[in-house]
Image (spheres, grey):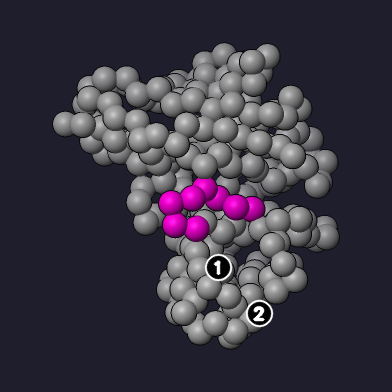
Amino acid sequence: QKEVEQNSGPLSVPEGAIASLNCTYSDRGSQSFFWYRQYSGKSPELIMSIYSNGDKEDGRFTAQLNKASQYVSLLIRDSQPSDSATYLCAVNEGLSSNFGNEKLTFGTGTRLTIIP
Amino acid sequence: GAGVSQSPSNKVTEKGKDVELRCDPISGHTALYWYRQRLGQGLEFLIYFQGNSAPDKSGLPSDRFSAERTGESVSTLTIQRTQQEDSAVYLCASSLGPAGGLQGTQYFGPGTRLTVL
């Protein structure tokens, strides 16, 4: 049973500070990792994807992947009230077209609140 | 371009009735997924279609749930003899390629909110 674990929160961060969201996964074969943001009552939208160990930066967002520790994180710098949402970690197994292992496993999400 | 669309946006039904939910994926996307999200909960995988391959139905919670997809276009999720526990938001997503590949980014539709009375 593949599992993706996230702290459900809520995580409260002052405006302008760095928000750090963490995710662990159980399947050592996982190769693709995604962070989605979901505003209340809305659908998830992709924030970041990462496939290799290390950091990947996109604007105020940095994804960090450590496959040895089976750990992926999302950092949000200069947090804004508009960043308040639930952040979903999703993990997939395999970069090949091996059908049957294609679906994403989502964590239950971390609710982030940015305090003005 | 147009994103993933779903209809209806809201559906209220009585226990025991059948419902059909529709998903129109992004044009050209070969992969289509259905998820269920109960209030305050995470995403629960239901079913996955990839091109003309047999669908992965491993997430369907019971035989009351079924889904069809015509080629690489529209999909319908059918719930027979609905129960109150089926009340949730049903989300559809599509991706250009298989989830395991670099074209696997999933784009979600707005969802259908199903309420079973």
Estimate the x, y position of residue A5 in percent, counting from the top left.
57, 33
Q: Residues within 10 Å of mark 1 (few under 14, many from 20)?
A: few
Q: In this figure, which residue is indicated by the disc labeled 2?
A: B80
Q: Chain of mark 1?
A: B
Q: Sequence order check: which comes first, mark 2 or mark 1? A: 2
The answer to whether dots 2 and 1 both sit on one chain is yes
**Residue B41 belongs to the span the image colors magenta:** yes
CA separation in Å, label 2 and label 1: 13 Å
Q: Which residue is pictured at 43% across the width and 73% down the height?
A: B10
Q: Is residue A103 magenta?
A: no
State the residue in front, A85 or A12.
Answer: A12
Task: Name the residue rendered at 54%, 82% in the picture.
Answer: B15
Residue A26: which disc?
none
Could you tell me which secondary element the residue under label 2 belongs to? loop
Task: Please state which amino acid type lies under the numbered disc 2.
Answer: Gln
Residue at the image point whose x is 62% and y is 59% from the top: B34
The type of residue carrying mark 1 is: Glu
Where B43 sits versus A4, above or below?
below
Residue identifier under label 1: B85
Instruction: Count residues near mark 2 (Cα–Cα under 10 Å), then give few for <14, some for 14-19, many for 20+.
Output: some
Observer-nearest residue: A2 or B31? A2
- Mark 2 touching mark 1, by CB under 8 A? no
Q: On the image, which quarter does residue A47 sit in?
A: top left
- Dominant SS in magenta: loop
- The mark closer to the camera, 2 or 1, is 1
Which stretch appears magenta? Answer: B38-45
Horizontal arrangement in the rendering, residue A86 relative to residue A5 (left or right):
left
